[in-house]
Image: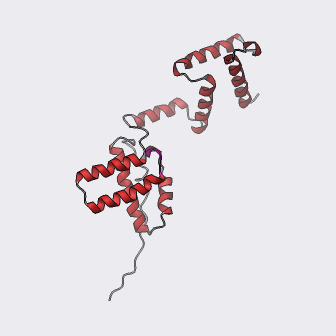
Amino acid sequence: ATLDEARKEARLVAQRIQGGRQEMNDLRPHDRESYQTAVGLLEPTGVPLVTAIQEYVRANKVLGGVPLLAAVDEFTRKARGMKLGVKVKDVVEELVAAKHQDGVSHRYLLQLQSNLRRFAADFNVPISHVRRDQIDDWLRKRGVANRSRNALLATIRVLFSFAKKRAYLPAGDVTEADALEKIRAGDVDTEIY
């Protein structure tokens, strides 16, 4: 039997047991003990056995063979002290308020608001979920000259730096915005009159 067939059979047996149809399964005593132990371990979490197995299998697939606990340890190490789930739009509004309190020029504040609110409108996710390729794609879709694109990237870098200082991003990592390179603005012919 393949692993998928075994999972299907285990799910079916677990559902039968949970449904009170124990007479329909043929679990051996050792298997029954394993099942009861698994259900007992999950009881404090309120997560059904089938759901736990499905999540584990999906996590294993996503991790590409990296042991789940190793991934959890790495995540925990990086996320220690982080405030998770803070959306881009909330970070933008905090940054704008902070810059206003800092007394930056009105023009700079308007530029931050304009650029970053457009960015936030297209990224309705936690800032920790935004990847560099998504930022790059967003910048390219603006259809602006390279200098303007670099100016937008600089503004986004300010946002990500602020998020890092506020512990919305891992402190020891390069931000996704900082990982993007500026674009060469190109040579401009200068005429002398």
Report x, y in % for residue 150.
40, 63
Q: How many tags in the picture?
A: 0
Asked if residue 154 shows in the view, the reply is no
* Above/below status of 35 relative to 61: above
Report x, y in % for residue 10.
70, 23
Asked if residue 52 shows in the view, the reply is yes
* Above/below status of 90 relative to 192: above
Query: Which residue is the extreme one toward the bottom?
Result: 193
The residue lying at 38 percent from left, 63 percent from top is 151
Report x, y in % for residue 173.
40, 44
The one nearer the camera, 188 or 124, is 124
The one nearer the camera, 32 or 96, is 96
> Does the segment drawn in magenta span residue 105?
no
Give the quadrant of the C terminus: bottom left
Task: Report the magenta stretch's main SS.
Answer: loop
The one nearer the camera, 44 or 177, is 44
The residue lying at 43 percent from left, 52 percent from top is 120
Report x, y in % for residue 52.
59, 26
Q: Is residue 10 left or right of residue 143?
A: right
Q: Quadrant of residue 87?
A: top left
Q: Which residues are magenta?
A: 123-127
> Does the segment drawn in magenta span residue 125?
yes
Q: Is residue 192 left or right of residue 77?
A: left
